[in-house]
Image: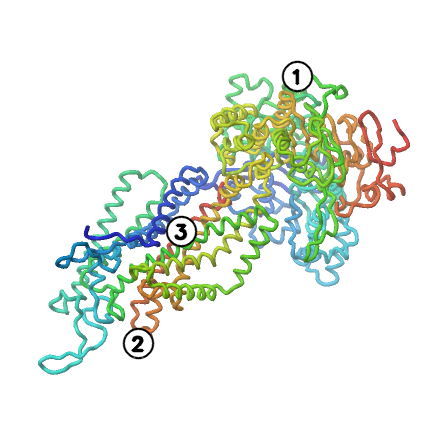
Amino acid sequence: MSFQPVLLWSDVLLWLLVFAVIGLGAYSGRARHLRRSWKRLGKSNVATAAATLLCAFLLVGLLDSLHYRQRLPDAPGQSEAVYAVEALSALDGLLSHLREHNERTYSAPLAARAFVMETEETTAGVTRVYPRLHYGGAHLEDESGKAIDVARRALTGVGLALLCTALVAGVVFRRKPQSDFAWRGVLSALLVLFLVACTLSQLAGDYHVFGTDKVGQDVLYQTLKSIRTALVIGLVTTLVMLPLAVALGIVAGYFRGWADDVIQYLYTVLNSIPGVLLIAASVLMMQVVIDTHPQWFSTSAERADLRLIALCVILGVTSWTGLARLLRGETLKLRELDYIQAARAFGVSSVRVITRHILPNLMHIVIISLVMDFSALVLAEAVLSYIGIGVDPSMHSFGSMINNARMELSREPAVWWSLAAAFSFMLVLVLAANLFADAMRDAFDPRHEG
Amino acid sequence: MIMPNPHPSSAPPTKPLLDVRGLALSIRQENVGWIPAVSDLNFTIAAGETFALVGESGCGKSLSALALMRLLPAGVRIERGEAHVLDEEILRLSEAEMRQRRGRDMAMIFQEPATSLNPVLTIGQQIGESLQTHLGERGQRLREHAAELLAQVGINDPLRRLSEYPFQLSGGMKQRVMIAIALASSPRLLIADEPTTALDVTVQSQILDLLQKLQAERGMSLLLITHDLGVVARMADRVGVMYAGQLVECAARADFFSAPRHPYSRALFAALPETARAGERLAALPGQVPAFSAMPSGCRFAGRCGSGDRLQVADDRKRCLEEAPLLEERGDGVWVRCHFQGTGDRCQVADNTRRDAPQDELTPDTCPLPPELAVRGLKIHFPIRKGILQRVVGHVRAVDGISLALTPGRTLALVGESGCGKTTVGRALMRMLPITEGDLFWQGQAVVARDKAQEKILRQSLQMVFQDPYGSLNPRMSVGEILLEGMLALGAVRKAQEGRERAATLLEQVGLKPESLDRYPHEFSGGQRQRIAIARALAVSPRVIICDEPTSALDVSVQAQILNLMKDLQSGLNLAYLFITHNFAVVEYLAEEIAVMYLGRIVESGTTAAVLTAPAHPYTQALLSAVPRIEGGREIIRLAGETPSPAHPPVGCHFHPRCPQATPECRQSYPPSTSVGEGHRVNCFLYQGAKV
């Protein structure tokens, strides 16, 4: 075999989550009250457009979650296969030219020459010039043709994008034009996606579209790699938080008494500790543990991955309080309703009352707050990485990109592209998540039913 | 446009105060657009007159009133029509102009006094707001005027009340304050939207008295919106009946009550439990009011109309279904919207509404059966805790020593005003609340706490039907799942398939289609939901059903359907009912025995006939007299004040502070139970000497 698959914990969790979401979707397709809500959601153009964008981000993230180690060429006399120490992902494989085309240092977006002057020895003597880049625009004989070349590639990209969108639109409207699903939202989001993707793919082969950073790495590559980190933080954290919040919230609201007192006390205390401080302390402790046990990890990716998971757990443990409080209040209201009383009159057990009567009537709150929390967590990661207690330095994330770009902004002329790329990708991701959450709240809120 | 004549032909024609012509409203519905709701509404109100708009919920009464105040919610708009107040067309006025008219020309009071007052402002501030805007009063003058208004609406010590907040007042007082606010700027027309529906009968009677007094003093006109024909009979000069967004009948009170013309009006009367004799079935209207989105093109009532033999004639039936009738005068200022009715055949009321022959009546005295469930000396006290250590500083004596016995095939009605502890009794019998003291007997055997086997039998034998059909069914479960839940929990069925068959039978038993099993509660109307709730209780074959106001959230015609159903089930399955209610009309119709509760104790009990015809306790007498009756003409015993808190019941007889016949003895000790007839017992000193 030419590669050896590597299972990172975060990969497993991310894929499990995706399957769980698909499973939940299938389940809710059967439950009639949820199906009505999904249908209402499908009628909103904003929701379908946001969902399309989120799916694109998810696709990138999932591609980046299939890790493997490449087999090294056999050394003479070697009997067993030897694999590279570095764990790569499917996305790395697809973007190998981006990953490998490293310059020496900074270069501006679409530049053919470096951003800083270097000393160059020629026959005419020692001169200070902006050297040509190794890869960016290296195919050009004559640099003056760069603008035309870029424009030609961009136009090809736009043309391709229009073609793809038209193709999809054709297929969609051929098959079922009469349903009231908001195809317009999907198609407009697809158009934007195709425009960006096609143009980038046309240009990225021979240019650094978003420039390069201090060590000469392509910023586009970093941005794409950051998407997975953001998704893992946003999704895996909810996996930690959700059982805590749902279980404790319902138990506190349903059983009252001392259980309620203990749980309320717990989250009141947790809430009154400054969140960043708590997270910083936990992250530092965890880092010490990781540093003192190097034998646990066979690759650096595994170490970075454990740190990411630990960060998710810490964020999850500190952020369940809001949802738990919400669910406790709602359960307090629900438990007094007549249908719960009727169930208790039949002698239905507490566990059954909770799973059959209370949980389904809380689902809309859970779904809404999950989607809303997702964007908050992505932003939280950026903040934590910015103050240096976020993900492992070897792992790309929006937060660390912004952190690195901080110093570069003070250069003259400023290096703005790292920051701009991270900012715009994160903005689109969070905005899409927020718009989707809004649309979901409208669709799932029982007060809108009628 | 045809106009009902506002005055009897004998009276001199004067200009009406309010003149509504051809008012039409429409409602916006998602994916449909604007659909007509109220159409072609015409009526007038003369100065000093009371006009009552009557109808079931969803027929457009409240919307019409809000349209007159120009306070329609978003999603409802005025389509056509004019409304003249003192010759001024108000529906075309700008919002700024309208704001001056509100309060000065017309004011409105709403159903729920608890939510109509702002909880963070004092009473004085809320009355002052209106005085300031309309009369420009300030400072001392404003305060005096506000106090004067409070005194007018019968609130004692008005100066102190001005600085109190709404939470310090009882429900009846809040409604008085609402009326004071409405009166602040001396309106010519007061619109009262179900002003007493949320109040107890004795308080309702006080508020209706107050409205009548104020109306007489000020010569104010009153537009009274209600669903209660008893209130109409007591208050109105003229009556308009609305059905599905249309006025179907408009007549003077006397004409309306002596001979209602429209088949719908007749059906409303026939559906009232008090008009039927006990043992007889109520004439329930089939079906329900059509939705605004599915309004029939012909007569809107045609689908439910069972009027006489007219509809059996094919031509006539076709006419009703295809041609919409107009509101036309049928002599003497009576306007009716019907192709056939109202031409003088008045005696039909009795003929076509009583459908079933009276059933054999059980004689109440010969009842050899032992009680299914009995309770003796039941007490339920809730501790009041205070301080950091949550020390118990007192008890709310919600139920304070009552004894009841429920017999198979018979109904015991537990009657009382809100807060008297009747619901608590029901919940305690279901063992949803801990019993502080008292003995429970099941089929003559004492119930032991924590006996697993007995517990299971009791759970199966005792079931409950709740008041609110919207809150008592889980919206996330299908009807089949709801019915199966109890059967599975109690092990009545082993497999879901077996249970489904039984559930389908149950649905047929309560008059629903078996196909409804896979539908969800929101697809059903209030009456149908209550049927499902009854089916759920029946699913485990109980012996006793506790009904906690099962019809009070329903319209009159639907209430009749449910009462009929309950009666059929009782005679078919030999069930014992404990019927908890505040509605005497229902009691009279359904119950064989009655127990009247006041502040956690039963003050009078006996057979329904004995208690209702010859009430002994002064509280029962007052309660009965306060119920608005359509026959009218009864002397009302007016009670002062409202029910005291059960945390601090008065010393001696609980009722003595409000009792018109209280003696010094009543302040000393609680009166013992005295017999005043066969099985008729009362706790009152008045009867102690006179043993029967």
Disc 2 and disc 3 on one polypeptide chain: yes
Q: Which residue is mark 3?
A: A436
Which element type, helix, strand or loop, lies under badge 2?
Answer: loop
Q: Circle 2 marks a residue in which chain?
A: A
Q: Looking at the rendered structure, which numbered label has been put on residue B357?
A: 1
Image quadrant assignment for residue A403:
bottom left
- Find out whether the residues at labels 2 and 1 contact each other: C-beta distance under 8 Å: no
Residue B439 quadrant: top right
Mark 2 highlights which residue?
Answer: A411
* Horizontal and vertical percent position of residue B169: 72, 51
Identified by mark 2, the residue type is Arg
- The quarter holding residue B610 reads top right
**Does mark 1 fall on the same chain as mark 3?**
no
The answer to which of A296 and B272 lies nearer the viewer is A296
User: What separation in Å lies between label 2 and label 3 (alpha carbons)?
Assistant: 38 Å
| Location of residue B342 in the rendering, given as x and y in whole percent from the top left corner | 63, 24
Q: CA distance from mark 3 to mark 1?
A: 62 Å
Dot 1: few (<14), some (14–19), or many (≥20) neighbours within 10 Å? Answer: few
Q: Is residue A351 above or below residue B318?
A: below
Q: Residue flagged by tag 1: what amino acid is it? A: Ala
Q: Is residue B447 left or right of residue A344?
A: right
Chain of the residue that carries numbered disc 3 in the rendered image: A
Q: Where in the figure is residue B518, as x and y percent of width and height? A: 47, 31
Q: Earlier in the sequence, mark 2 or mark 3?
A: 2
- Three-letter amino acid code of the residue under disc 3: Phe
Q: Residues within 10 Å of mark 2 (few under 14, many from 20)?
A: few
The subunit letter for the residue under badge 1 reads B
